[in-house]
Image (tube, helix red, strand yellow):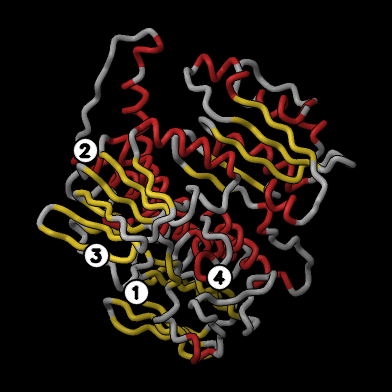
Amino acid sequence: MHFVIIGGGPAGTQAATYAARLGVDVTLVERDVIGGAADMWDCIPSKAMIATGGAMAFLDRSHEMGLSPVRPLLDLERLRQRIAAITTRLGHATESILTSQDVRLLRGEGRMAGPHSVVAETAEGRVELEADAVLLSTGSRPRIPEWAPIDGDRVLTTRDAYPPKDLPHHLVVIGSGVTGVEFVHMFSSLGSQVTLIVSRQQVLPTKDPEVAAVLEADFLRRGVKLMKGARAVEIERSGDEVAVRCDDGRVATGSHALLAIGSIPNSGSLELGTAGVEVDEHGYVPINHHCQTNVPHIYAAGDLSGKLPLSSVASMQGRKIAEHVVIGHTVSHRHLNYDKAASAIFTEPEIADVGLAEADAFAEGRKIRVTKVPFAAAAKALIDDDARGFVKIISDPATGVVLGGSIVGQHAAELISVIALAVTTGLRVQDIVESMLVHPTLSEALAEAAE
């Protein structure tokens, strides 16, 4: 069996290594970077910058922990070198794993040339591949509307900002979703003045209002200006100044503007029509619970599939696809439940959630039990001098089964794993309560919230 994968991001690399271990002949075609552009050019660099900003913030307030005041200075070039070193090391590690599993790597542009035919345009020439199964995992790219004159200098997409050529004196961020708020946190931590254009009446409009309120309070404490109920419609650059005009007439001016209004799938160059694969009006490739497209032996995963745009989800899709390609027709396996995927936002404080949201439960008229404990009651939070945030757990009042939860506070992205495990495996709140956790730790707040 020959399994051809177009796209070497989290879905593609996970599918490749797992299928190869199961004895399949695998060829992976990647045009940009092994590990995926969204991960290696967006996610990892942004988190590295956030870590640097976090270190600066910690040193800045270290006098509150009994140390002499320290005011760190940002070295933009060393930060740039650090990001490059991290992504290079991760890319080499991923490539080493692939080659150790005898996965054939082709550097070039992949596209369909028929239901069982893939063409890879490489630097060495055109390579034609016959495939028994195909995975499409080409990811996405930043969405750029016609009114945004991106120049990579003063008007930026996310991929121009890791880091930018110069640290913005005043950055105007357009978009208050996950990516937008991370950029607000990142650059305000590094010393930039920031204005955030919020199209609705709260940041993170799809998140719990209590969660959004904590983040907004932190932004205001930092001096971030929030322009709520404003939708950007035009960007004008005049010398070293950028003006962002909104639909209500308000104008935000700064030294730089950054666009963070979502992404679009990389499906246009795949020539999917030659293989009979359907694409929706937005360019996504619809899939079933096995990640199959309308052509059963052709699969899609990651951002291209239109499911949750998370690396963790893409990786799990890749694993499930490899399993289905090899043994799925004869062996039953558990389908992915996207409603139980944990997600995190790496602001300060961090935000993480999983499973059923409180607002959604009320909208559905579903009975739930909601318990909430602030980190201010946790000894470890006080020891660390950061008691912001809370733990909220949602459970079934009749059975005690954990249905979901939210965490706002330091290390929320790590702590949510406990609630995610409970949601995935059907644990009860009592199971968390009776776990004898380490003291003093932030995780103790999980047990208290489950009481």
Q: CA distance from mark 2 to mark 3?
A: 26 Å
Q: Mark 2 or 3 closer to N-term? A: 2
Q: Amino acid at mark 1?
A: Gly
Up-down relation of residue 358 to residue 410 (above or below): below
Up-down relation of residue 171 to residue 68 (above or below): below
**Residue annotated with mark 3:** 150
| Crowd around label 4: few <14 · some 14–19 · many ≥20 (10 Å) | many
Dot 3 lies on which element? loop
Q: Mark 4 or 1 closer to N-term? A: 1
Q: Amino acid at mark 3?
A: Ile
| Crowd around label 3: few <14 · some 14–19 · many ≥20 (10 Å) | some
**Residue annotated with mark 2:** 78
Q: Position of residue 407 (x, y in %)?
A: 60, 36
Classify the position of the C terminus by image quarter: top right
- Label 4 vs label 2, nearer the camera: 4
Residue 322 lies in what quarter of the image?
A: bottom right
**Residue annotated with mark 4:** 305
Query: At x 24% / y 25%, what residue is drawn?
Result: 72
Q: Mark 4 or 3 closer to N-term? A: 3
| Crowd around label 1: few <14 · some 14–19 · many ≥20 (10 Å) | many
Query: At x 59% / y 79%, what residue is drawn?
Result: 298
Residue 269 lies in what quarter of the image?
A: bottom left
Residues at marks 2 and 3 touching, judged by CB atoms closer than 8 Å: no
Dot 4 lies on which element? helix
Q: Mark 4 or 2 closer to N-term? A: 2
Up-down relation of residue 375 to residue 135 (above or below): above
Q: CA distance from mark 4 to mark 1?
A: 21 Å
